[in-house]
Each structure stands twice: as C-alpha cells, then as structure tokens.
Image (tube, rainbow, N blue to C red):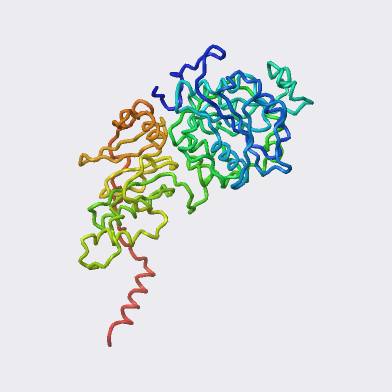
Amino acid sequence: MTAIRQNDYSALTPPPLGEWSPSLSVSVVVPAHGGPHLDLTLAALACQTYPEQLMEVVVVDDGSEPPITLPETRPVNTRIVRVTDGWGISAAVNTGVKAADGEIIQRLDSDMVACREHIEAMARWHHVSDYVVSIGMKKFVDKPPLTPKQVYRATDLGELFDLSAAIPSSTEATIEKTDGLRKSRNPYHVCTGPTFALPREVFHAVGGLDPHVLRGEDTEFAYRLAMHGVVFVPDERAQAVHLGLPAQHRDRERAVRVVEPFLAHRIPLRRDLRKDKGRRWLVPYVEIVLDVTDTSEATVRQAVAAALDGKLQDVVVTLVGPWSRLGDGRRSVLGDPCFELRVMRELYAHDDRVRLIDEAAPTPSPTPFRYVGPVDVPLHRATLERMVESVQKDLAGVLVVELPDGREARLERTSALARARLLAPEGGGDPDEIIEVTHGIRREGPDRYWPAPAAPKPVSIPAPAPAVPEERTLLRRLKSALRPN
C-alpha cells in the first residue's frame, strides 16, 4: 500500500470516470424515517454509472409509520431492512451495514439526489487504497416539483435544480481552503453524514456508529475513523443536492446546544468544548502508560500522583502489570511474593482515573495521545502540556525525549500508530520506520519537558530602623516598669 503523509493523498491516482472497470462491490445504505423524498433518492441511484451488478441499495426503515415500501423507479438490487434494535440514524446505519454484502459501504441520506457519477466517483478511490474514506459534495436546495422519472432521465443535476440559488455546504468551503483536505489538521471535521464511503472492514473495525449519540453521530464516527489511521478524500465529481435546509438553518441555537455534550465527551481534540474546570470526560485527551512490573508501591505512588497532578488534567493512567495472575485464594498476607502488586491493586482499583491492565493495547484509540515512559521518572507538572504543544506544531506522529540515563519517554499520536498498523508488512516490522514516513518523528532533549527547579530568590532581612525620640522615651519607661524593685 502507498504510505500517505498525514492527509496528503496526492500520491494516489484514481482512474478517470468512465474509463475504467470497477471490481469492488458497493452497498449503498440509506437510513429513512418516513422518507418523503426517498423516491427521488432511489431514482437518482437507479441511473448511476457504476455497474448495477456491483451495486446494491439497502433502505433501512427506522420505525416509519406506515412502513416504507419501495417505489417503482429504483435500482435493480434494492431491498428494505427494518431496525429492530434501537432507533435513530446510528442504529439505522448499523442495521443496514450489518445486512449489506458490499465490500464498500456508501452512506447516503434519504433526502439526497446524487449525480449519475456519484457512486463511481466515490468508489474509485477505494480501488487504489484500502484505508481511504471518500467524501461527496452537497448543496442545499428547496425541493421543486419533480417526479422520479424526471430525476432518472436527467443527465445533470443542473437540469433538475437551480444550482445558482443552492446554499453550499460549509464543509465545501473548508475543503477548498485546505487544498482538498490535503493541508487540513483535522480532516474528519468535514466527513458528515449525508454522503461518504469506506471499506466495510474499516466500518466494523471502529465499531460502527454510536447509537448513544443522537446528534453529531457522523462527526463522532469520523473522529474514530481518524484514530484508526484513515485518509479522508473529498471528490468534487461526486456531486449531490440535499432537499431542504439543514437543521442549523432551521434552529441554529438548539442544533448547536444539543450536539455539544455528545462531542465534548467523545472527541478530546475539541478542546473548545472542554473548558469547564474540574470535569472528567468519557474519552480522555492523553493516556499515560506505566509498566509497574517489579516496581515498588512507593515508586508507583509517586509516579501516579505526578501524572494526575500535572497542568494537563484531562488524562487517564494505565498501570501495566501481571494483575490477572493475582489469585484470590488463601495466602500469607504479609509474606505474599506479590505483596507490592497487591498493595498497588488495592490502592488504585477504585480510582476511575487509573486502569490496571496486563498488556497495553496497540493504540489508545479513541484517546488521541499516549505517553509511555519509565515509571521511576515522574512527570513534571508541565511535561505533558509541553509535549502535546510540540507534536501539535507540525502534527508529528511521535515525540521522543531522550533522558539523561539513555532511556526514552515518548508521546505517541494515536492516528499515526494506527496508520503504521494499517501499512505494516505481514509479520510486523518497526512502526517507527513507517511513522517517520507518514507523520514524522521529533527527537529532543529533556530540558524543556523536565525543567530544573527554579533557584530560590535570596531573602534579605532589613535592618531595624533607628528609634525616634518618642519611641526611645517609651522604651525607657517600659524598661523602668519591668525592672524589679
């Protein structure tokens, strides 16, 4: 596979539209509740340039009353599945993907009308890379009086809609400003729900959409895709229109307020949403991993205290050790050979900011950063804050701090670790060699991250001021009064 630097997919060359032979099957998953415009959506999908034998459409009925029925004008391979577990867009998309047979999952809203080349334009990227998420374009229009047959016969969206009066999506402006996301620091921001495509294996690898997120579910899902190491590729040839204005235009104040708590808890990179002091969040910003095997409880206590008392409080501490080997059978409490580990376990087992695991996971996803360092080198209060600042300057994949005794402390970017796993040859290999290519590795000394204590300021004691005449008189009287007779 081609090693892509951060999100610069310039090294990929997709085949020209209409001049290639696709081989991957596509499942278009269309969640719908009621689906007043579904007939137009399906009519547009019925005239796609992608081979019909490689495309299926799965319409997911999310509790519609009456139940959805398929219109006459639709793709050949179209079927309905119904949500039986939960409700909402996330539950519907997950239901559709579970029922899908395609190697590529194309998400499309039931109020979208896609151009004829839409599916082909999106799918072509997945023929040149298997860790890409392709993103379609969309504009918002008022629905004119249209029939499905008119949509089916049109060769261009401009024949159906007044595109000059269409409201462009804000994501398209972001795409343009960041050179098609090649220079975007957080490209997942524009991967919103109405139209995107990804490998089915990737969808399942990140766990699908979160049914507990009722608004902003597409952004939260895209964030987890980013932590999986994918590359986001917008395709301007994959045009579509959205029938009707988005919720932000209808009730912006509530649309913004309702999404904030969902994203604040689940997307640590949204630092603007985590300004409340003293809070604990569902997904922390940094995981601090310390191997405590054969380490004294006193050393671990000092390390954990330093980790939790830093300037950067949005953290969780993971203590790696042979915890599963600590049986609960009869033993000598004081003479236990695992005495130190047992004391540690009792000390931290009920602290929700400390985790006890036998082996660290390959990546800390969905946490965006991981610190790994010697347990006997406690963090300075400024260490993590400064390490994150350093890697965020150039989006480096790893910061390696070379300690004075020859050991290392590392801050690792989750998306870089995950990209290295996607690109690793069979049998493994050195992930740092891949990260050097895809994100870059910074190496620095410890002085900035473990600054020396500031020298105490000299304290000068001023000499007593000479007494004034009145004070001398008072002092003589006081001494005379205290002198014994």
Q: Residue at x 36, y 43 (%)?
A: 361
| Residue 435, x across and y down, in percent | 35, 30
Judged left or right of residue 186, residue 361 is: left
Q: In terms of image quadrants, where is residue 96?
A: top right
In the image, residue 393 above or below residue 157: below
* Residue 459 appears in the rendering: no
In the image, residue 207 above or below residue 467: above
Q: In terms of image quadrants, where is residue 346?
A: bottom left
Q: Residue at x 68, y 32 (%)?
A: 111
In the image, residue 415 above or below residue 166: below
| Residue 81, x across and y down, in percent | 62, 38
* Residue 104 appears in the rendering: yes
Looking at this view, is 177 or 355 the one in front? 355
| Residue 245, x across and y down, in percent | 71, 33
Q: Residue at x 32, y 75 (%)?
A: 476
Looking at this view, is 87 or 219 the one in front? 87
| Residue 42, x across and y down, in percent | 67, 28
Looking at this view, is 454 or 343 the one in front? 343
Q: State the quadrant of the N terminus.
A: top left
